[in-house]
Every structure is written in C-alpha cells, then in structure tokens.
Amino acid sequence: STGCACCGPATTADEPARSSASSPRSPAPSGSASATYRVEGTSCGHCAGQVTDALSQLEGVQDVQVQLVPGNAATVTVT
C-alpha cells in the first residue's frame, strides 16, 4: 500500500521536501509580511499539522495556513 511521507511507506526514494516561493495570496496584516510556498510530500491532515506546528514555533511567525493540493503537495502561507 502507499502512504504519505510521514504516515506510510513512500512509493519513491526518500528525498528532502522541496519548496519554492511564490507570490502571497492575500495581504498580510498591517506591519507583517506574508509568503506562500509549495511544499512537496505533504498529502494528509497529519502532514499539514506537522508543517503548521514546525513553522508556528519559528520566531516572528504569526500565522500558518496549509492548503492540501492533489498530487502530494501543499500550498503553505506563512505570515
């Protein structure tokens, strides 16, 4: 059976998650910057929670939004 990178056996060789920056989707709160990234290897709610928890612990991060996208990736917006 197949699974996501964190919850089950991978179907391909293990590779580090890659991300690429793109334009922010919505304006950040006043005085804040926002950036949106595509994170590969993120395919379920558990993955999204792990990404959210890790990014939320970084200094200066006010908000993390993870939108799962079909194809084993996610759009992650960090403010």
Image (tube, rainbow, N blue to C red):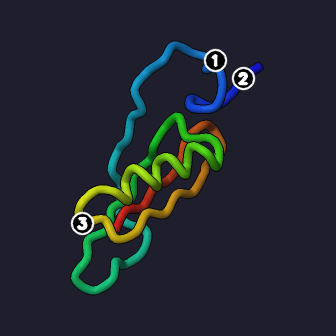
Name the quadrant containing residue 29. bottom left
Q: Disc 1 marks which residue?
A: 11
Image location (x, y in percent) of residue 7: 63, 31
Q: Is residue 63 left or right of residue 50?
A: left
Instruction: Label 3, secondary structure: give it.
Output: loop
Q: Crowdedness of circle 1 by 10 Å Cα count: few (<14), some, many (20+)?
A: few
Mark 1 near mark 2, Cβ–Cβ under 8 Å? yes
Residue 30 lies, with reference to residue 23, above or below; the image says below
- Residue depicted at x 34% and y 77%: 28
Q: Disc 3 marks which residue?
A: 60
Tell me the quadrant of the picture where the C terminus can be found: bottom left
Q: Is residue 78 left or right of residue 66?
A: left
Q: Is residue 30 left or right of residue 25?
A: left
Q: Nearer the viewer, mark 3 or mark 1?
A: 3
Name the quadrant containing residue 56. bottom left
Image location (x, y in percent) of residue 35: 33, 61
- Residue depicted at x 42% and y 75%: 26
Total number of numbered discs in the rendering = 3
Residue 61 lies, with reference to residue 28, above or below; the image says above
Mark 2 near mark 3, Cβ–Cβ under 8 Å? no
Q: Disc 2 marks which residue?
A: 2
